[in-house]
């Protein structure tokens, strides 16, 4: 199954990915409505594309008390159902990538859904800073899975401690 990957070394900061995403989902060209962000690190002089990694053991999915976050079996995308979401912000707090966003106008949380398996950000990224491919090194996936599981455990333990 293909995975979305980000390579900051190829990113020029053009933000075409943000515009393509916001137009696909919201029918407006507005980076603030995009599910992907390009973060400028001035000290380093680099731009970094940041978005949902659609983790195998997604910590956001593990901590959601109402199961508003699930995995799409066709695309392996981690999907947030805004109608089921109760706005507790637990997913927002635990996502190690900062990939969950809040739309002030519609008062709903949202995140990347892989555009039903054909990510618009990838189509418009001329430098291949964002790719969607089966050809991934297993090590980063294993590392992401361990990090997600560790974060979920820590969050659950903190929640249990605070409820005593």
Image (tube, rainbow, N blue to C red):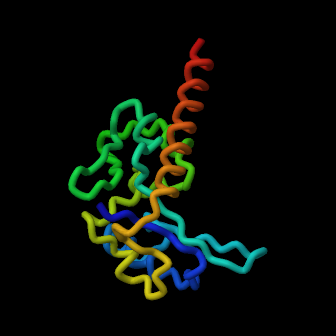
* Residue nearest the observer in this picture, 76 or 37: 76
Q: Residue at x 33, y 35 (%)?
A: 67
Whether residue 35 sits left or right of residue 96 in the image: it is left
Asked if residue 52 is positioned above or below residue 16 in the image, the reply reads above
Asked if residue 40 is positioned above or below residue 71 in the image, the reply reads below
Could you say where residue 32 lies in the image, as x and y percent from the top left?
Answer: 50, 68
Q: Residue at x 35, y 43 (%)?
A: 69
* Residue nearest the observer in this picture, 50 or 16: 50
Looking at the rendering, in which quadrant would you find the N terminus? bottom left
Q: In the picture, residue 64 is in which quadrant?
A: top left
Q: In the picture, residue 162 is in which quadrant?
A: top right
Q: Residue at x 46, y 63 (%)?
A: 137
* Residue nearest the observer in this picture, 83 or 134: 134
Could you say where residue 87 lies in the image, as x and y percent from the top left?
Answer: 44, 39
Please identify the residue farthest to the front as the structure is shown: 138
Asked if residue 160 is positioned above or below residue 95 in the image, the reply reads above
Could you say where residue 139 lies in the image, as x and y percent from the top left?
Answer: 51, 56
Please identify the residue farthest to the left as the structure is shown: 74
Tell me, yes or no, if residue 104 can be seen here.
Answer: no
* Residue nearest the observer in this picture, 100 or 142: 142
């Amino acid at each position: 199954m293909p995975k979305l990957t980000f390579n900051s070394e190829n990113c020029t900061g053009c933000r075409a990915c943000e515009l393509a995403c916001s137009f696909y989902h919201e029918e407006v060209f507005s980076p603030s409505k995009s599910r992907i962000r390009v973060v400028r690190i001035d000290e380093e002089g680099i731009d970094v594309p940041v978005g949902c990694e659609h983790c195998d053991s997604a910590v956001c999915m593990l901590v959601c008390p109402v199961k508003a976050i699930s995995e799409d079996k066709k695309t392996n995308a981690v999907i947030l159902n805004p109608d089921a979401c109760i706005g507790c912000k637990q997913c927002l707090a635990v996502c190690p990538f900062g990939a969950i966003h809040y739309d002030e106008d519609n008062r709903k949380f949202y995140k990347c859904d892989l555009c039903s398996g054909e990510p618009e950000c990838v189509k418009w990224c001329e430098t291949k800073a964002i790719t969607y491919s089966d050809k991934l090194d297993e090590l980063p996936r294993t590392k992401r899975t361990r990090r997600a599981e560790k974060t979920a455990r820590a969050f659950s333990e903190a929640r249990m401690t605070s409820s005593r």
